[in-house]
Amino acid sequence: MTWRLAVDIGGTFTDVVALEESSGALHLAKVRSTPDDPAQGFVNGLEHIAQHGEIDAHDVNAVFHGTTVATNAILERKYSELGLIITAGYREALECARQTVPGEFGDITWWIKPPRVVPLERIREISARMDVRGTITQELDRDEVAAIAEDFKARSLQAVAVSLLHSYRNPEHEEAVRHIIHEVYPDCFISISSDILREYREYERTNTTCLNTALMPLLSAYHTRIEQHLREQDISAPFYIMRSSGGLAQAQEVARLPIAAALSGPAAGVIAATHFGTLSGSQDIITFDMGGTSADICLVEGGQPRMLTEGKVDIYDLKTPMIELHTVGAGGGSIAWLAGGRSLKVGPDSAGANPGPACYGRGGAQPTVTDANLVLGRITPTIAGGSVSLHLDQATQVVAELAAGLKLSTIAAAEGILRIAVENIAAGIRTVSVKRGRDPRSYALVAFGGAGPLHACYLADWLGMQRVIIPPNPGVTSAYGLLLTDVRVDLVHTDVQREDRLDVDRITAEIQDLERRVTARLEDEGLLTQATRLDHFVDMRYAGQAYEIRVPLAIDPATPDIQTHIQRAIVAFHASHKDRYGYSYAGKELVELVNLGVTGLGLLTRPHVPQTQPAGTSPERARTGQTAVYFSKSTLDTPVYDRSALQTGNELSGPAIIQQYDATTVVEPGWSGRVDQWGTLRLERTH
């Protein structure tokens, strides 16, 4: 037998999936995360799955990992101190940032700029300079750079970022600066903007390079600890990390480019949700991943999640490919509290893994969403196959204390906590759908994460959605998603050209250069060229606009004329602009080509997903008992089912509780469900 191991570290639990490649058999494990040292949670998870799954280290073919280490470091400002080398005259580039004020109304009277990643006193200017075409106008002064490196060394700075003007056109000076610094200060981490982001816009390129550099010492040490443990366990298989773009990279690559993994774990969940949605016949879905600390939401159309070329992590703008996710501070561990002593709020603070909700019995003293669900009977006191016991008395006590401040009953307070949490999530779903002209009622809701299935039908009722899809193992879906993706490399090159005066020869040469560099990167990942695929894209805008839309550049080898492909991309741009903004200027305004790009995919074998034959409609053999559950102002006797005993074709009607090792699904009154041949639970609203 040969195995693939996937480990996803969340805020409360670390999830592990072991996949036997030939049969598709799965072993699952959930262990508590270790926020003070996430690598320890990874180690604990692997040891647990190896022991209980009886997996021999020599049979492991690959290890995949999704992590929030980079994200948490940015959120908590726990990255390394660094220095920045920049072109003379641009020392305040990070302070200038952008003139656009964030928020829907752009009110500058309340806007506070984010603190710099690099304070002004650690920024150094050099005289070397290039013009906008990448032509050198002032040669590099080696002694000037060496003196700066000596200064940074004396200050014991661990990392140095380099972002020089127009280096996206010509990286020669940046590469020379890196070489000189390594000679003078070989122990420091260094990244150059032309490696991180080969695009124009000095602020975004500089800020992204600085954040990447600041994360390098942390991510390098983290990956080193994990790889050391793998060696100690005699696991010599390749070790891959999930990128924010939904692709994989070897750990050494992510240690060099950690900013690419800023949204690593949630991206894997979207990949898996899209996979199970497609299997169940729904390619237009809204993914809903609710864990212990937050809920991540993504709009997927035609089986493809929306991709961003830039986004935000907390208060910082990042220019790196990423799946478009909207995060809401509502998870099972989100704390309920009173604002001003009388207004009930839920989140964004979370009880996390330690101490966790009060019902965990680990010292939690504040009511959480999980405690409210337990009080309402939506979770039974024994979960995870009987391995975890929840303390109803402690949950009732903390919710009752909150209820006293609201002058409500304990049940009413618990219901209020649940309603507010669900409304917060519903607002997030409206952000990715209604605000873009999409009606959520036309989409299926794919719910996963430890708490997603618990709230899915309630949330769908709130939004008027008709269909809910629950993957076979929802609590570890993000970990499973790591097994469904490929190694991915994205490279972009800026070359602004208007459609009426395209330099086709130059564009062709630039695409060929990108293809060569992408292929080389994939070969560095240990992948043979016959196992790769190259996809091309172009960023376009109307002349005079400030920002672009990315559209595919469908290059057909049978049609060598690149101009034909660009004209097709222009047609696609007009359609995409109309879809996104409600109008297009086709035939009225000229289009500008801004960036050319190539995505290289190192294709990995997909896991085998076994299908099962129908076994009748009755779910009675899976019924384990019944429990009293509070649903919308009434308590109902509700049957409880063991999901592992449900079979293909089994049908059930709400209200119902479906338990499994990694999650609990609540089927609300007015909903019915059926298990399909993939083991997915399809729920539909009946009235």
Image: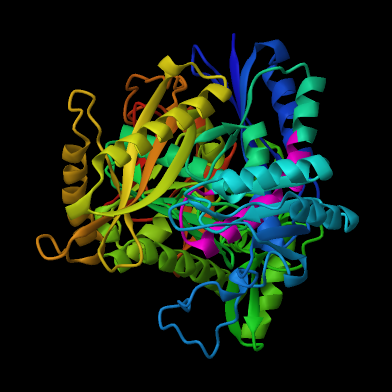
Compared with residue 473, is residue 426 higher up or lower down, i.e. above or below?
below
Q: Please state the horizontal and vertical placement of residue 643, each as a whole percent of the image.
A: 49, 34
Write the start and end of the magenta stretch as one range. Answer: 197-223
Residue at position x 68%, y 67% in the image: 367
Residue 353 visible in the displayed image: no
* Residue furthest out toward the bottom: 109
Q: Magenta: predominant secondary structure element? A: helix
**Foreground of the two, 319 or 18:** 319
**Residue 652 covered by magenta stretch:** no
Residue sitting nearer the eye, 260 or 186: 186
Q: Quadrant of the N terminus?
A: top right
Quarter occupied by the C terminus = bottom left
Most distant residue in the top direction:
1
In this view, the residue in front, 345 or 504, is 504
Q: Residue at x 19, y 23 (%)?
A: 558
- Snapshot quadrant of residue 562: top left
